[in-house]
Image: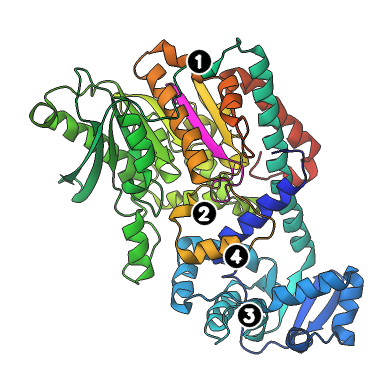
Amino acid sequence: MNFNDRCFARKFTALSLSLLSLNALYIKKVYSAENIFAVYTPFIASLRVNSLEQFAKDGTVNKNLGFYLNLARVNEQQTAEFRKALTTPVIVDPVLISRILNTNEGERLLNYFGSVINIRGGRNGKYVLRGALIKAALEKDGLSLINVLRNLAVDIQIDIPQALKYTDQINLVVRGSEFFANEIVNLAMAETDSNPSVDFNKLTDIRQLGPMRVSNTTLNLFDSSRNRRFYVELYQPQQLTPNNPVIIFSHGLSSRPEDFKSIATHLASYGYVVAMPQHPGSDIRQTEDFIAGLSRQIFLLNEFTDRPLDITFLLDELTRLNSSQFGGNLNLESVGVGGHSFGGYGALAVAGAKIDFENLENSCNLTFGNLNTALLLQCRALKLPRKDYNFRDPRIKAVFTMNPVNASIFGINGLNEVKIPTFFGAGSYDPATPFVFEQARTFPFLNSENTYFQLQEGQAHVDFSQLDAGITDLVETVGNLTLPSPYLLEQYTNSMALAFFKVHLNSDENYRVYLQSSYGKHLSEGEEFKTHIITHKSVPALRQKFDQFIQDNSDLIFGSIIR
């Protein structure tokens, strides 16, 4: 895939809008508004809602609407696309929309869009938008933009300068994603040129399963000190060896341990015992409870503390059970930890990263931060009691993360406390933890010379083969969008996880050759969607590229979260 192709930006934007439409579309409706006012002080112009209704119904462009279409210089095709955008419905449960918009994350999104879509006089329109969205979802033909406009209770006004500012910021995110994807590719190529020549075809293909047969069991644990009960999926080789290495892997938000069977099986087939704890309060069951109305939040606030504590408690329990269930074979003094997304947060926390409340508060106060969807999750942590949280577990010796949530909650000061070998995995299409915010920007903050960054082209945070039919259908509506096979992405991730832990947990130098950029090039041979690997060697250059990007876009970045 050629990252210089401008379609990258279009694809990133399209995928982001598709995956986030269950948030973004939750922001549009009211009862009987007659006019939409565009305000660009001192000028005010109005567009009648019935002009849009007539246009949506039969395509009629009256004088009122025609003025704006001419002003925007739209052609016939764009006019047709605008009509389609007005009328295309999304069938969603209005009760679920109401619940989402009443969460902390929903409130933040409404406030963001309400700063552009105001009540007459300039007041934030978030409450009008909330009511309109819920009423529009009750319409028999579903939630659409025209139904939102029909259900507006009062006239609204669009703050044009603010809207233009947000548009520029969105373009900056797209442009920044493209810029840093290109730079990661360039840095990986530069490292490859400096790597010693290796014929990987003559080496063990670590993409394939190892020689050991794997068994899977489930542990049920109870931490009485927290009144917390959770299960653990355990993958292990059928024959344990003395000093057998152990890896703890933490799942992401609205997920479960079983979703990471592939990486667990892969590592276990090479001799690792992989323990994957459930995190009640932020797992799939919590999401199901939220949808059913049994919980008011998508995840519970205490998950910021409970997740890392789950990992430490699990290690304590494995130590207690080592003699009776594992023949005393487990090495629990030198343990690896891994995590995906929110699980990446927990993994970094037990590796030493500390919450930086000042940095988090600064990020959450920036309007630009609303374009980073991972920040919606992180800002919840501001409701925690302000104290020095230290979750570091000295038994953790290496940390492997995939799409980790980390940038604002830890920042440079918090991540600087991570002094052990660390791996960051990122996806170029990731709308949930955009790599330009959450991984590329923070990779230089890690305080170890044994750090690695892997960018996977087309990786979009989740395995689409595991999504429900509704989300899958939504993604498939995005024009000209193709995604890599989940199997390919698993190979990219599993092989790097194995090499990383072999070197930094087992001290097996035979695997170090796989932890270099030239191996990423080898993995990518013949693939449309490639993977690119850089190491600590590229940190100075990556820092310089961020400085360059900030300087080149200083008018847009001033005060923004990228900084």
Front-most of 354 and 169? 169
Task: Return the residue at label 3.
Answer: 148
Viewer-closest of 199 and 549: 199
Q: In this view, does 271 lie to the left or right of 409?
A: left
Quarter of the picture containing the C terminus is top right
- Check disc 4 and report the residue beneath it: 24
- Inter-mark Cα distance, 2 to 4: 13 Å
Nearer mark to the viewer, of 3 and 2: 3
Q: How crowded is mark 2: few (under 14 residues within 10 Å), some or many (20 or more)?
A: many
Q: In this view, does 70 lie to the left or right of 89?
A: right
Q: Is residue 208 magenta?
A: no
User: How far is mark 3 from mark 2, CA to CA?
Assistant: 24 Å
Sort mark 1 into few (<14), some (14-19) or many (20+) by Cα contacts within 10 Å: few
Which numbered disc, 2 or 1, marks the residue closer to the eye? 1
Q: Residue 376 has which mark?
A: 2
In front: mark 1 or mark 3? Answer: 1
Q: At which x and y percent is residue 348?
A: 42, 33
- The kind of secondary structure element at disc 4 is helix
Amino acid type, residue under disc 4 in the picture: Ala
Residue at position x 35%, y 30% in the image: 267
Residue 130, percent across and down?
A: 55, 75
Q: Which residue lies furthest to the front in this view?
A: 202
Magenta residues, start to end: 417-434
**Residue 78's image quarter?**
bottom right
